[in-house]
Amino acid sequence: MSQPKFKRIALIGIGLIGSSISHAARRAGLAETIVGSARTQATIDTALSLGIIDDGFLDAKDAVAGADLIFLCVPVGASGPVAQHISGAIESGAIVSDVGSVKAAVIEAMAPHIPQGAHFVPGHPIAGTEQSGPESGFADLFEGRWCILTPEAGTSATAVARLTAFWQALGSKVEVMDAAHHDLVLAITSHVPHLIAYNIVNTADHLERVTEREVIKFSAGGFRDFTRIAASDPTMWRDVFLNNKDAALEMLARFTEDLSELQRAIRFGDGDTLFKLFSEARALRQDIIEAGQDIAAPDFGRSEKSVPPKKG
Amino acid sequence: MSQPKFKRIALIGIGLIGSSISHAARRAGLAETIVGSARTQATIDTALSLGIIDDGFLDAKDAVAGADLIFLCVPVGASGPVAQHISGAIESGAIVSDVGSVKAAVIEAMAPHIPQGAHFVPGHPIAGTEQSGPESGFADLFEGRWCILTPEAGTSATAVARLTAFWQALGSKVEVMDAAHHDLVLAITSHVPHLIAYNIVNTADHLERVTEREVIKFSAGGFRDFTRIAASDPTMWRDVFLNNKDAALEMLARFTEDLSELQRAIRFGDGDTLFKLFSEARALRQDIIEAGQDIAAPDFGRSEKSVPPKKG
């Protein structure tokens, strides 16, 4: 079992993920010191007042100095420039990781700036909420969720094992995967769902014959679920699509093809096809619940009121 | 204030909605007797054992006899045949309603079978979960949710007022609307969201380069939300699309047009367009929460663990 404790963890970016790493790492006793950097003093002040960081810096280099574990928790489009900026401050032996939702493009952008002697182990915790900012983080965010690490061939096995132990100590399950495959998997499990959610919210917003007020009032029929995902941080998601273009376009093309089949079935009144395709979708939900990746309560257990009476 | 109490309520179909009407009506003391009919004796036995009905019948006519309030709680494709079957048993003065997610086609199918002297007031409670069957109902399902009534011109105002008072006593807010407009509004707030959810689940299911096991494991990135909706009753949803074809196809065409714009923006690396379209979607979420149509807790408050610490 590798040793998951570090002397100084540097969080570059203190949003939902960075602040949650801090809460979870403090609870598990994984760091002597946690420092961070942010683009604004206001974010640093908030993070200090919430106990997320022990010290905060406007210049990421100052946070990185002396750190043995460094997380870039920034939109993936910023990964390259930030890595370049901190490059000279990264100490020998330090583990440099990130939390970006795209891995191949991030590796391409960051790897050239990781100095010899430091260990680059890119990562992606599959966890989050629709909220952003240092106030939105919490220690349980990673509990039971997967974290994917995508180290390149030749990366120190010791460094990968230590980062694995760290994420496990935060409550995560860890899987090591090829970066390109990660990007393909996430395109269907995360990126395209977000794109679709953003899209239907905008479609609803632009109707002439249905008012926005009506959309809001009657959203409990299904639409409201999509608005939660569509409330996610637009900068983060812009960068995801700019940096995972090929996989996103491939999955989107398949989605559109499949949607055409349903559309045709509706147009020609083909109830058998609709029933068949709708029935197949049901089974996957149960598998996800059994895998511990969602709760079983109806309607996401939106309120305790939504729990049906137990059967005799 | 109209009087919402009835002597004998007949539920034709005892699934999620029918059983929830019973639980809520009993709690509010709105019925002397609640009876029901179902296609199988097993469903009737379950409904009897859960106290949902006082008496159960395999022939809907036997439930309808003597009832002063009749709800058809069946897939919308069955509305016409069921109305025809019970027609002769409907008593003068009875209110006949339904809970179907489509209104124009249901009115067309049912209206010819409602006898003179009875009052046909079609309705649609915008409430539900992904679960089905008599065990899935609960008294709070309609609390704070809208119920849309779509009576045709010339319907007894007294009957509409009584049914309005009934739904209000179940906890609902009530709006009266033209059936065709209802079908358009629901196409975007409910029908197309369900179609999209079914579709992406099937797209994910049919990939070659991403395994079903990977989809399940990493579904917390967004995909799992879609699987909840896609777990809804396939018969009900088949009938919705067969019976609201024009509005569903119109909304689907708009959705696809808008999706093409996003797809183009991804292909050509147009981050400004992506950011703009993603930002617009965020505001609607807040409006829905403020309208009381969803909870504010991050991630649907999936677990109490997901609640971030309150700001100082």
Image (cartoon, coloured by chain):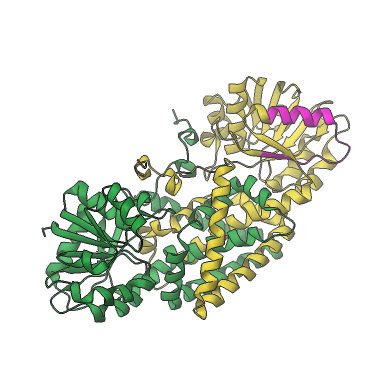
Chain colours: A yellow, B green
Residue A95 in percent (x, y) is at 78, 30
Q: What is the x, y in percent for residue A47?
A: 56, 29
> What is the quadrant of residue A215 in the picture?
bottom left
At x 67%, y 29%, the residue is: A168
Left or right, B114 with reference to B18:
left
**Apparent side of residue A238 relative to residue B197 in the rendered image (left or right):** right
Residue A48 located left or right of residue A310: right
- Give me the residue at 87% from left, 29% from top: A117
Question: Could you say which is closer to the camera, residue B106 or residue B303?
Answer: B106
Q: Say which of A214 and B70 sits in front.
A: B70
The quarter of the rendered structure image containing the C terminus of chain B is top left
Q: Quadrant of residue B106?
A: bottom left
Q: Quadrant of the N terminus of chain B?
A: bottom left
Which residue is located at x 31 percent, y 53 percent?
Answer: B45
Rendered view: B180 above or below A193: below
Position of residue B77 measured from the top left corner of the image (x, y, whole percent):
38, 73
In the image, is residue A227 part of the stretch drawn in magenta?
no
Q: Which residues are magenta?
A: A147-167
Q: Nearer the viewer, residue A310 or B120?
A: A310
Name above or below for residue A5 compared with residue B172: above
Expressed as whole percent of the image width and height from the top left, the position of residue B48 reads: 28, 51
Front residue of B305 and B244: B244
Q: How many marks?
A: 0
Inspect this view and state whether residue A180 appears. yes
Q: Quick check: A106 above or below B150?
A: above
* Residue A64 in view here: no
